[in-house]
Amino acid sequence: MSEKSDFWNQVDVVPVTGSTNADLAEAARHGAREGRVLIAEEQSAGRGRLDRRWVSPAGAGLTMSFLLRPALPREQWGTLGLLTAVALEEALKAACGVSAKLKWPNDVLLEGRKVCGILAQAEGGAVVVGTGLNVSLTEEELPVPGGTSLLLAGAAELDREAIAVAFLTHLAAVYRSWNERGPASVIERWRRNSATLGSHVAVSFPNGRKLSGRAVGIDSEGRLQIDPGGGGAVATVAAGDVVHLRPQG
């Protein structure tokens, strides 16, 4: 609890808002300090990557954004999504007794199904990171096929306050280490729990280009490295939609 209490300086909980990320981005533009957290019982205009809507019934998820002002160079900020996933994986294991896997670039999986999405956005000298964790959603309430919730995965803890405290505690510790020592430790912890590395994947880019191959690594800036096979050069991917393919053969 000490990590949580001396790093997070303002934690606000609101019944409903358009987007917790948008609200904190606005606060960042007006000079808000690092360590501010906003939790909403419900979002009316939440979004995920590529401007997709993120929907969850009121009170059924943990919808949270937090504001960081990193000391590391901007080119390393791309690893903050991986950092958030690592901290959440550790918190879910400690608080809920479930073992999550991490899908590049921004998903947390339970039993191969998405339980949380993460969205990081730079705002001047700050980064706002949002998470949408499915806590007590039933099968019928899931917003997309292939999703799950802590309830459906048989988690030992479903109290959202307890989960939030665990998450923020782990997050503060991992972020401090990242800020002081660089992203290498975070990347290694992400690798250990990755569902993506070693898998055959297909990547779709916003411009319509596609790439497939075996995910073989993560570089120091958090970019995915893909071996297309057939003697082709390993490609480095900074952003894209990734689908895990069934093993070949």
Image (spheres, grey):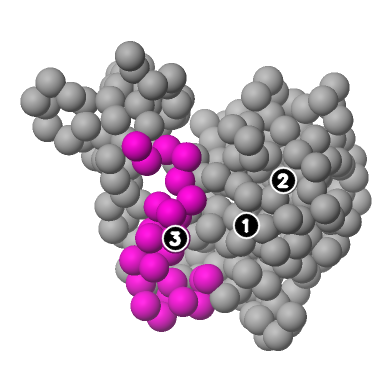
- Indicate the secondary structure of the residue bearing disc 2: strand
Q: Quadrant of residue 143?
A: top right
Quick one: quadrant of the N terminus? bottom right
Is residue 24 at least partly visible in the picture? no
Rendered position, 53 above or below 86:
above
Callout 3 touching callout 1 (CB < 8 Å): no
| Residue 145 visible | yes
Instruction: Kindly identify the amino acid type of the residue bearing the numbered disc 2.
Output: Leu
Q: Horizontal and vertical percent for residue 27?
A: 66, 63
Amino acid type, residue under disc 1 in the picture = Leu
- Farthest residue, direction left: 231
Give the main secondary structure, helix, strand or loop, of the magenta stretch.
Answer: helix
Along the horizontal axis of the image, is 178 left or right of 42? left
Q: Nearer the viewer, residue 64 or 181?
A: 181
Marks 2 and 1 close (CB-CB < 8 Å)? yes
The residue labelled by disc 3 is 189
Q: Which segment is the magenta one?
A: 174-198
**How far apart are labels 2 and 1 at the CA level?**
10 Å
- Look at the numbered disc 1 and give the secondary structure of its residue: helix
Q: Residue at x 79, y 48 (%)?
A: 155
Marked residue nearer the N-terminal end (2 or 1): 1
> Label 3 amino acid?
Arg
Magenta-colored stretch includes residue 194: yes
Percent from the top left, x then y, of residue 118?
Answer: 58, 46
Numbered mark located on residue 133 in the image = 2
**Residue identified by numbered label 1:** 88
Residue at (55, 45) in percent of width and height? 101
Mark 3–mark 2 Cα distance, whole angstroms, equals: 20 Å
